[in-house]
Amino acid sequence: MRETIDNLMLDVRLSLPSSVSDDGQTFFRWQIPESTEQLNTPFGLRELVEGKGAVEGARFHEDAGELEIPLKSLAAWLTRLDGAVSSSQSPVSLSLCLRWLNQVWRLARTIVQARDVFAGAFPARASVAAAHRLLGETAKAGDDFLPSSGDGSFLAKWVPAWSSNRLLAARFQIVSSGIEAIDGLGVSLSVEDVDWLFISLVDEMVRGELFAVSDSTVSTGQTYRVMYRGEEDVMAVWSKALQTNSPPFSADGWLVARSMRGALVKSGWASDAFTDRSGRFFYEVIFRLHPPVGEGTMADWYVSFHLRHRYSGQTIPLAEWWRQKSRRWRIGGAVLVEPDAWVFPKLLEAAVICPLIRTALSGPDPVGCVIPVDDVYPFLAQYTPALQAAGFPVEAPEVLKAGNTRVRVRVRGSARPRDGRRVSSTSGQWFRADGLVEFDWSVVVEDQTLSRDEFLRLVDSQTPFIQVNGSWRLVPVEEILRQVEAFGTEGESSTTILDLSRTMSLLSQSDLPMDIEYEDDAAHVQQIVEAFIHAVHVPDQPSPAGLMGQLRHYQAYGYAWLMHLRSIGCGACLADDMGLGKTVQVLAYFLKLKEDNAAQGVHLLVCPTSLLANWQAEIKRFAPGLNVYVHHGAARDWDHVSSGSKSMDVVMTTYATLVRDLDAFRSMDFDCVVVDEAQNIKNSDTKQAQALRMIRAVHRIALTGTPIENRLEELWALMDFLNPGYLGSLSWFRKTFSNLVQGRGGQSATKLQLLLRPVLLRRRKTDPDIQTELPEKWEVEERAYLTSEQAAMYQAFVDQLFSGIRGPDVTSMSRRGRILATLVRLKQVCDHPCLISGGAPTVRRSGKLRQLVDLLSTVIDEGECGLIFTQFREMGEILCDTLEAEFGVRPKFLHGGLTAAARGEMVDAFQSGLDPSPFLVLSLRAGGVGLNLTRANHVFHFDRWWNPAVEDQATDRAYRIGQTKDVQVHKMICSGTLEERIDQLIMSKRELSEVIVSSSNDWVTELDDETLRELFTLGPQGVWEEEEP
Amino acid sequence: MKAGTRKRTLESLWKLVWKDIDKSRIRRAKQEAKAGAVAQLAVKEGEIQAVVRTGGPTRGSYHVSIPLLADYTAHRQEVVRWLTYCPRWIAAHFAGQWDEGFWTFIEENELAVFPNDTTLEKLQWGTKCTCSDWEPLCVHALTVLAEMVAQAEERPLRIFRFVGLEETDLLDGVHQMSADIYETVQSNWIRTIAEQKTPSDGETCDWMYEVEESTPSGRLVPQFRAGTSNS
């Protein structure tokens, strides 16, 4: 029996009412297999007719196999049917028609549950179509016009209001399938028929649940409204008719229509969606982006066009539209009539936003458009948001911003040899600082690795997407590119260790994590790279025992830093401010190497001629243990170097001599080459710079007091000498940091600092840490050589003196006079020979003047100001001429020949900065007292006054209350001359007592001949070699 | 508005015809058309037929027949093909816009849908109206013309009515042709992608029965029994 019931199929046939008062009939039919005749009605249908659950008006037509049910009882019966067929045990299947009817019933029930109904009344004789039209017209009627429903008798019905768009969409679905898609109902349905079916079912259901009908104008307290005549009566009978199965009630048609309109205007009946058959209110055009099929990242993407139901989410490709033979689009149960009328304008609207879509409308049968691989990103980034904002949903494959993205660098040792200087660490391990390492980088996005080539292809094709575990990821290409650019993207896969280190130390600061993997043969590379990355952690070094004096804290650090860079085989640029003691740090470094026996040869020190004397003096003072040979001047002898190199520690020379004797220098392997005033090699094309590059050395150190960070080319040239390749190619360097030159520092400045941090050490006098270690006023002796002209003239005066004071007829008076006169002449010779012999007051003729110019340019570079004292009026003028010629601005000269008012103005102008020159030249006597010149923090004593108190007074012009900076006093001394010796004398005496030296020079005249000779004689190594041949 | 940027309109083309007709008649015809005087406008028996219902002194209902500017009924398939191969024109038509390319196409191919120098004469000779006006182009005929121009301004494909082709017929033809050529114009791979469906695209009816509670509107409001409430 079970099988037979399984075969039971229920069907339905409708006999629709023609007028509103007609009930209409529904015939349910079933087919029972012949073998089960005893089961004459399916699953309790008989109970509907007879007995307890009988439905009013139901009749069996057993001969036809049909159950007849009046429309007004349909709801009740369908309720039972739905319950029966919903159960999983149901042996009954429903025909398409009955399923549709079941949908109608379920929607009606939903309406009732939503309470989305209003009270309706229809002329009792109206046809269903007329009643329907009446509802539609009343819904859209204005205040002053109501469609006439005539006077007479009315039938009360509860009517679905369809007041939500979702209910309207559901109605559309059922209406359109009812009238377009369902055959076999026995009738051809119209929209009016279906709506009447809804009204009948809803009315039936509401009546079944009704408790009362209330008049809302009363219940909301609108009691002051004046009723129309007869209105109350109409409402009373209408209410009653809505509750009971009473016959038609009589009423004034206008009152009825007016009352219904109140409900209808707000209902779905007034909506355009109510009459629409094209689906425009319930479907939307959406775009769906398809990634390329298959593995490649190069293939084009595709956007297909679809309709999507706003509520069910059912999505249909537009392609299906072109498969419909007529302009009716059957979608599931529903049928869209001429949907092209709204779909195409929608596409046109989207095409205005996204030109790619426009192309689809230029050919027949548009179904979508190709998104060329280059346009995928713009489509996602630009067009998708714009389309969405315009109300077009875009379904794109999930493209997530890739999480956990890293650059992975794998480093291998290189088998390829490369010529280059060799660098050793102090531990004796040898490697090439500019030796090659092989590396490759890749990009890791989540679990997926992109090789360099793959990544670059991604960049080229501008499709920053990769597929990870089935979903798409947006790769932060720009960010990665910025990182890997430093490695070069040109397919280079080898670089120098220095280069690699530089890159790594830059990358270690970035946000994008970096994995570095070293293979076994690259273990030493790892050591260096890490040393670079951690360049700031310099291990302490004990001071060398042979160093006279105590290193200041920052000097000790600088010295240890030089040792550290040597250990990692990296050239160093020590760029401390002038006066911070770069010399002593280098000397400590030399001494340490000597004491550790670590030097692998002689050190070479190259400096401008003007600094030779200073170096010699400093070595003598701080590192007397170093054996130094000065290879300079006419008497220089290379054999001395080559034969004595065993015992020699340092060879000093000048840039000019280096160029001249380059072949000799090139024949030697030096340990460390130190270049002082390294700005001399700022132009890599000069002979000096080229010569220096040819010198072979284990380690290179550059000293400069000039800030060089902002002079890109000079910086690059300097670094190119110290660590070739460290700043990359000049063009890369220029490109990367060009905005620094244009004054837009920011990120680039930080980047450059990071890049330089391992190899450039620069401390400022103004650094708080340094400042605490510096005295507020400190004196530096600046030593200069005489030029050969000066030396000859000097010698002549000395010779003349000694021949003149020996004679028998020399009285003590004349002796004294001659000595004092010579004293003045010699001082003038040291200042400038033209003070004696006239001629052009050029810089070249005076070693001291030349050095002064060098020092002053450093002062200018540091943005500071200086006072220059001289005791010779003529020298003051020469100084002014020279400074004007060198720096473009003529300083004022304050001397005794000026009126007090003029001096006052001069001082005010300098103090206030109105004077454009950063320098002021003063005569020692005139500028010695009473002036306030605290704008200057450098004081130069161009010539010496034998009384330190006078110099101190002069110095105090700058070093007094109001001075905010530390004051540096430069005492200019010609090496090997009486200036130097008198200075030593003064210093030694000063330590005893300042009063011993009187204010006059008389004490000199009291010296015996021998002491006098010692004092006056020109010492060795005191002659300036003309640099230019 | 500057002359150079003025939008091209059908109305401006029809000035060629209007200029030789009494201005007051034209004005009145346009008013009548705007007021909805024209009914049953259709191409029948090789001419344009309509019923015009006017008020005023000439109150009444008149049958008007107007000659086609040219007879393209034999070229229907050609027109259908042009439209099929440029869906943008169809889209513009539905959107109520004149596509630049469509306009240019008509001009370049000298389609007889726009009036020319001989149009007036042709209309004067061929137009018939059931009114008693002795003028060959009576107000009723002008009303029909004005209505046709106004309609074609809003619905560009209706321009073909002047040559005997109806909008709906053309659109049906275009769809028919599109359906016929679909498989040949769209490559396999595009059809595969474009017709692709995902599991979530399927049909479901459950959404229809999701209850969104509303408040009964209108004057007479049902009070439901407790226990039958929707909540």
Image (tube, coloured by chain):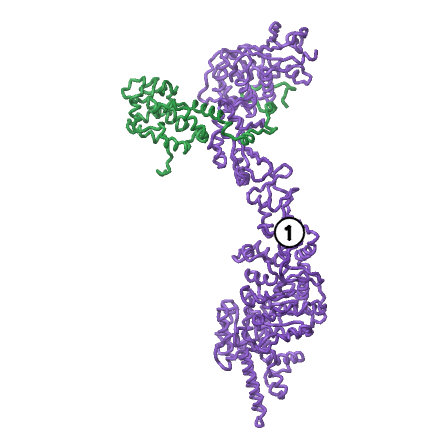
Q: Estimate the x, y position of residue A803 in percent, counting from the top left.
A: 57, 89
A427 versus A363 height, above or below: below
Q: Can residue A465 be seen in this view?
A: yes
Instruction: Report the residue at 61% width, 28% height from top.
Output: B199
A580 versus A376 height, above or below: below
Q: Estimate the x, y position of residue B149 in percent, counting from the top left.
A: 37, 27
B177 versus A464 height, above or below: above
Q: Is residue A356 left or right of residue A74?
A: left
A167 versus A531 height, above or below: above
- Image quadrant where one finds the N terminus of chain A: top right
- The green-tinted chain is B
Q: Estimate the x, y position of residue B68 in percent, counting from the top left.
A: 34, 23
Residue furthest to the bottom in view is A809
Q: Which residue lies under the disc numbered 1?
A: A439
- Of residue B163 and residue B184, the one placed in the foreground of this image is B184
- The purple-tinted chain is A
Task: Locate residue A576: give its quadrant.
Answer: bottom right
- Of residue A128 and residue A959, the one placed in the foreground of this image is A128
Q: Can residue A779 be seen in this view?
A: no
Dot 1: element: strand
Residue furthest to the top in view is A63
Q: Residues within 10 Å of mark 1 (few under 14, many from 20)?
A: many
Tag 1 subunit: A
Q: Estimate the x, y position of residue A609 in percent, counting from the top left.
A: 57, 73
Identity, as a three-letter code, of the amino acid under mark 1: Phe
Instruction: Report the residue at 61% width, 10% height from top.
Output: A29
